Amino acid sequence: MQTNPKSNGLFPTILASTVHDIKNSLGTLLELVRQTAAKQDGQSAELNQLEFEAARINHSLMQLLVMYKVDSQKFSLDIEECPVIEIVDEAIHQQARLAGLHNIDLQVDCAADEMCYCDNAIISNSLAAVLNNALRYTHKTILIVVAEEDGYLTIAIEDDGEGYPPHFLGADLNDTAELDWVSGNTGLGLYFVSVMAGLHKNAGKSGFVQIDNESRLGGARFKLFLP
């Protein structure tokens, strides 16, 4: 009698291994696309779009692998003190190609000496995922604001688009049961960022995220709170 792979936990492991292999192959493909685009001085809109889509898929696969490790209790943060502007700059760097393709003005309000304790790579990747979403839906401008609020460091990403849809605003971003898996517009990126924020803890506080349509630019606003 054959054993159902799901019954002994083998299926998630196989899936994670497969995702990892796909991510490696996609990384090779992405590098080839970038080399080809560089030979053409970045003038090919098709290659630029291909690079962006490949990077977006690669980022989604990274999120899946991290979430698998979190669920399997095999994930731990690498906390260190770092300048917040470096985290923001890295997130912008990951999305610079898309911003250029759509002529989006990226504005940053962050003090050069603002510091925080966090997992630099995880937070910058998380912000890049949110920024990617904002770039897809904004009209002309995105504003990134770093501030301190009630004992938390906050990083806000605001745009001038149409704002978050009502089902996003009313959902619990920590509850996968409330995500819309049918339409394809799941909010998985926001869920990932919410989980990563929650893993950051300090002095009895945990990180979290908030979303609303109170952007100073008239559209959506995302806020990350780090203790």
Image (cartoon, rainbow, N blue to C red):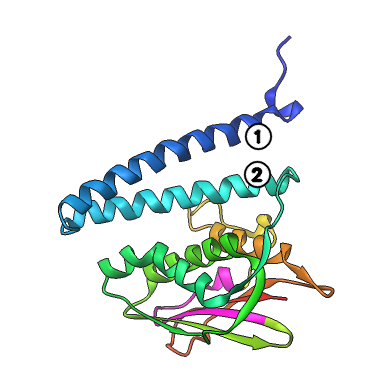
Please provide percent x and percent y for residue 132.
43, 65
In this picture, which residue range is highlighted in magenta? Answer: 153-169
Which residue is located at x 69 percent, y 57 percent? 77
Q: Is residue 151 above or below residue 132?
A: below
Asked which secondary structure carries label 1, the reply is helix
The residue to which callout 2 is attached is 68
Type of amino acid under label 1: Pro
Q: Specify whether residue 159 is painted magenta.
A: yes
Q: Is residue 41 left or right of residue 87?
A: left
Q: Residue furthest top?
A: 1
Please provide percent x and percent y for residue 9.
73, 30
In the rendered structure, which disc, 1 or 2, sits on the residue that comes first in sequence?
1
Asked which secondary structure carries label 2, the reply is helix
Task: Determine which of the numbered discs, if any, sits on residue 173 in the image.
Answer: none
Please provide percent x and percent y for residue 209.
64, 72
Q: Are marks 1 and 2 in contact (CB under 8 Å)?
A: yes
Q: Residues within 10 Å of mark 1 (few under 14, many from 20)?
A: some
| Image quadrant in which the C terminus is located | bottom right
Q: Residues within 10 Å of mark 2 (few under 14, many from 20)?
A: some
How far apart are the two marked residues, 1 and 2, measured between alpha carbons?
8 Å
Q: Is residue 160 above or below residue 89?
A: below
Q: Nearer the viewer, residue 79 or 23?
A: 79
Type of amino acid under label 2: Tyr
Which residue is located at x 76 percent, y 46 percent? 73
Q: Is residue 150 left or right of residue 90?
A: right
Q: Residue furthest right?
A: 204
Q: Nearer the viewer, residue 111 or 133?
A: 111
The residue to which callout 1 is attached is 12
